[in-house]
Image: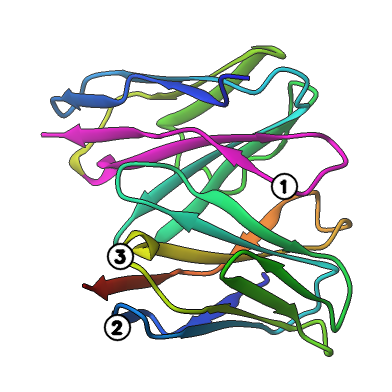
């Protein structure tokens, strides 16, 4: 299996622009998680889905952030408009529904100038 | 909400030394997990623990599930340079809406 695939690996954009991060979970995994990692705040859970349905989005910072999972093999995290404080590494992770072991992608390094 | 306190925050050790780190929680978990993150990559699962008192090894790594279910420990014996990275503990309780709670990580540096 190719593992969790995220794209792009790096994104540099200007403040105010829309940013879309993409994730393909491991085939057969029913749960998908979006995390953000910064030096100051560590690993923060933004949102997670079970069977393509958002279960907990309490970690989403504000309305500028939105996430979708239109099918079992694809999810997006969108930031519109982006701000410099959104600069971070964003990770996608997946697991089986009844399995606690998370498999992470390699992350997207986002820089908002 | 639940919080995990992971310590130490960072460690600088000489190659060959043993390493110990731990994680404590204000509430109980029924699964403890330890992950390692290398530079430029996502965390990778090292060890999973499912029972209070359980001791599990993975090569030079040994982890323990605390008796109180509120803590866990990770030891690395005879460290080598490729052990460098950030080690995260995570607690999971299956009624906790299905999500793991992560510690802030221990950054390990190994000097050759």
Q: Chain of mark 3?
A: B
Name which quarter of the figure residue B111 lies in: bottom left
Q: Position of residue B46 (x, y in %)?
A: 61, 57
Q: Are the two marked residues, 2 and 3, in contact with CB atoms closer than 8 angstroms?
A: no
* Element class at badge 3: helix
Residue at 67% x, 75% y is B63
* In the image: residue B20, left or right of residue A110: right
Q: Which residue is tagged 2?
A: B13
As helix, strand or loop, the secondary structure at mark 1 comes to: loop
Q: Is residue A98 magenta?
A: yes
Q: Nearer the viewer, residue B67 or A32?
A: B67
Q: Are marks 2 and 3 on the same chain?
A: yes
Q: What span is in magenta? A: A85-113
Q: Label 2 marks which chain's residue? A: B
Q: Does residue A28 sit above or below A103 in this rendering?
A: above
Task: Evaluate if marks 3 and 1 touch, with contact meaning CB atoms under 8 Å apart.
Answer: no
Number of numbered tags placed on the structure image: 3
């Amino acid at each position: 299996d190719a593992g969790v695939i995220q794209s792009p690996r790096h994104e540099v954009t200007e403040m105010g622009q829309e940013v879309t991060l993409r994730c393909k979970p491991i085939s057969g995994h029913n749960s998908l998680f979006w995390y953000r990692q910064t030096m100051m705040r560590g690993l923060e859970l933004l949102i997670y889905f079970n069977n393509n349905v958002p279960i907990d989005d309490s970690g989403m910072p504000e309305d500028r952030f939105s996430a979708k999972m239109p099918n079992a093999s694809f999810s997006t995290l969108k930031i519109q408009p982006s701000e410099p404080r959104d600069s971070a590494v964003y990770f996608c992770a997946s697991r089986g529904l009844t399995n606690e072991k998370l498999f992470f992608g390699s992350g997207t390094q986002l820089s908002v100038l | 909400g639940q919080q995990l306190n992971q310590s130490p925050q960072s460690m600088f050790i000489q190659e060959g030394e043993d390493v110990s780190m731990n994680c404590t929680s204000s509430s109980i978990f029924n699964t403890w997990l330890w992950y390692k993150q290398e530079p430029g990559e996502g965390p990778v699962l090292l060890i999973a623990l499912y029972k209070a008192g359980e001791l599990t090894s993975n090569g030079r790594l040994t982890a323990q599930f605390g008796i109180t279910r509120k803590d866990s420990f990770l030891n690395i014996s005879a460290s080598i340079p490729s052990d460098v990275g950030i080690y995260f503990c995570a607690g999971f309780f299956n009624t906790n809406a299905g999500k793991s709670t992560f510690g802030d990580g221990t950054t390990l540096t190994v000097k050759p």
